[in-house]
Image: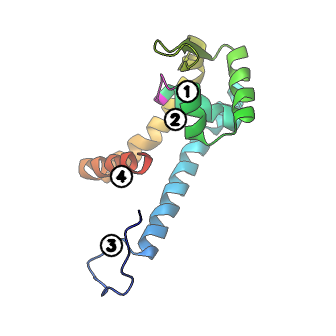
Amino acid sequence: MAVPVNLNRPFDPRLFLTDQELDRSAGLLVSGASVLARASETSRKKAGLSKPELQILMAVRYRPGQTVGELRSGLGMTVPTFARLIGRLDERGLVERARETGDARRRKLTLSDAGVTLTTPIAIEVRERLRLAFRASGPEAVAGARFLLEALIR
């Protein structure tokens, strides 16, 4: 049940969550993701990966053990598209699928040794961009950014 919202409440000047600030934050998140994607572009092309294939591999690298369905849903891909992409990555020997112990129909994904080798230069590029930004921001800002991003993806 939706909670009624009082749109006629008085304005509180202490609020930092104005539409303008939220729009600015959304823009910064989109721009930040774009910077990280561009940082890995050369390595992606050298590896012969499409952008969606790289997206899958990096999602598996950073969160191994997700089921095929969880990963597909998390990436917002359709079943046919995801099946085609994961099939290509499997043919190249970049991912491994292990049966889940409780439900043999479900498969958990991890990177193969070849997948780890292929994604390592990309992870290094991303890490370096983050390292520079985190150093410039300081430990309190880094902790706040992690907290924010974890809350966002929950």
As drawn, 114 above or below 43: above
Q: Amino acid at mark 3?
A: Phe
Q: In this image, 85 relative to 25: left or right?
A: right
Give the x, y percent position of residue 84.
75, 28
Q: Give the residue number, with chain letter if any, for mark 3.
A: 16
Q: Pointers 2 and 3 in contact (CB under 8 A)?
A: no
Sequence-first tag of 1 and 4: 1
Q: Residue at x 44, y 68 (%)?
A: 22
Q: Pointers 2 and 1 in contact (CB under 8 A)?
A: yes
Q: Amino acid at mark 1?
A: Pro
Q: Amino acid at mark 2?
A: Glu
- Secondary structure under tag 2 reads helix
Give the x, y percent position of residue 15.
30, 75
What distance separates the C-alpha of mark 4 from that of mark 2?
Answer: 23 Å
Q: In this image, 30 relative to 18: left or right?
A: right
Q: Residues within 10 Å of mark 1 (few under 14, many from 20)?
A: some
| Quarter the C terminus occupies | top left
Magenta span dominant secondary structure = loop
Quadrant position of residue 42: top right
- Secondary structure under tag 3 reads loop
Q: In this image, 154 relative to 37: left or right?
A: left
* Mark sitting on residue 125: 2
Give the x, y percent position of residue 94.
63, 17
Q: Residue at x 56, y 19 (%)?
A: 106
Sequence-first tag of 4 and 3: 3
- Residue closest to the eye, 61 or 140: 61
- Residue closest to the eye, 71 or 58: 71
What distance separates the C-alpha of mark 4 from that of mark 3?
Answer: 15 Å
Q: Give the residue number, with chain letter if any, for mark 1.
A: 121
